[in-house]
Image (cartoon, helix red, strand yellow):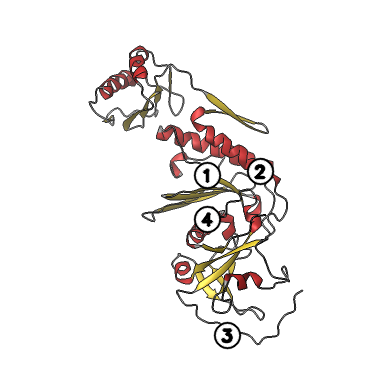
Amino acid sequence: MIEQVSNPPYEIEELGEPDQLFYHIPKGIFKTKNNYEDIPPHAFTPVGETLSVNWEKYCHTPQECLNIKTDRYPQGRSTKTHGVGHFIVKEVNAIPALRAMHAPTSYNRAHSVLAGFPDKKLFRPPYNELRVKLRTIFKWDIPPADE
Amino acid sequence: MFIFVWNNKKIVMKIIKLSPEQYNAFSNTISEPQISYGKQGLYNPGILDHFLQSFKDYLSNQYKEMDFSDRNDPYNNIIILDKTPQVEITYTFDNIQINLPEDLKGLAETLKQAEEILTLEENWDDRGGRPVSRATFASMAQFLIEYSLKIYHNKMSVEIDLPNIYPSLEGSIDLDWNKTDYVLLINIAEQGDKASFYGEIRSTGQSVSGLFNPKNFNFEFLPQL
């Protein structure tokens, strides 16, 4: 368990249209093809119904985004395990059914989500469409490091 | 290879790799069509004469396409006039053994390379991902081969686009055609009896999506690359 910083609840803010939202992709996604320019659609499958990202206003650089400590990564992530890139808010919101929203937690003010995925994703449109469109607008900042 | 495609209302002809030697050989082969079959394995002999005359005209540059809508033939006949036997390659996986035209050698290689996804372990994606089972892979391979063969025969082309094959959510498999001018993503479920797809033409944004059973699908309802 990482040490939870005791912050007062952060106010939910409006994301700026040109703002960047940083997104981690685990290196394991690329296990069968080590080509980081050809990103498998599964990289854009959320664990739940929303895809977690970090807003550049409070997580200023891709490296800072990698360094965020979580329960799973108490020392932060590194390029040995992850790459990080970004979406632009305006481009996310241009995708039908998808909406970028600020969703701060008590220990991560930058936390934001891309909402609009179906609950049980397989065979529920627009799951495939969202994965395809997110891949199109995603841009690498720091790809995973080669071994 | 000389090929006629009868597509119910129109005949579209293509000549692949027509060398001078093949041109000369044509006179020897045209009177003896070697293979003829249709969608239901049927063949309407009455059409053959029409085809043969059409092909002669084609070689004389009389026309490139011919409308047969008045013939109302239901069989989607394909008539191959070449005597040269088709070279075939075989793709094998577990109890699957499928012969493919040599033109689809790349498909067999893609499938063989994709077998690497069977080595993935639990949590391969760092998000609790399940391994891909051999049964799921077999279902995917059978679908992809059948789909590719239909595209191959439909296009009458020696080349077809090949997908990347990726492991995906809950033991499913993604077939991903991420091409310059279009994208097509097909997800095949772990049980192999359900699939969903999304396709888009990049230049226009025209898109199509849907669900189907990979073990019993209607080709006309899927994107035809």
Rounded to the nearest angstrom, the CA distance separating label 4 from label 1 is 15 Å
Residue that carries the numbered disc 3 in the rendered image: A11
Disc sitting over residue A128 in the figure: 4
Element at label 3: loop
Q: Are marks 4 and 3 on the same chain?
A: yes
Residue that carries the numbered disc 2 in the rendered image: B116
Coordinates of residue B141 in the picture (x, y in percent): 59, 38
Mark 4 burial class by Cα count in 10 Å: few <14, some 14-19, many 20+: many
Q: Look at label 3 and name its amino acid.
A: Glu
Residue that carries the numbered disc 1 in the rendered image: B163
Chain of residue at mark 3: A
Rounded to the nearest angstrom, the CA distance separating label 4 from label 3 is 33 Å
Element at label 2: helix
| Left/right of residue A9 with respect to residue B51 in the rendered view | right
Q: Are marks 2 and 1 on the same chain?
A: yes
Residues at marks 2 and 1 touching, judged by CB atoms closer than 8 Å: no
Rounded to the nearest angstrom, the CA distance separating label 2 from label 4 is 23 Å
Q: Look at label 1 and name its amino acid.
A: Pro
| Residue located farthest toward the right when viewing the structure as drawn | A1
Residue A44 lies, with reference to residue B208, above or below; the image says below
Depth check, front residue: B195 or A98: A98
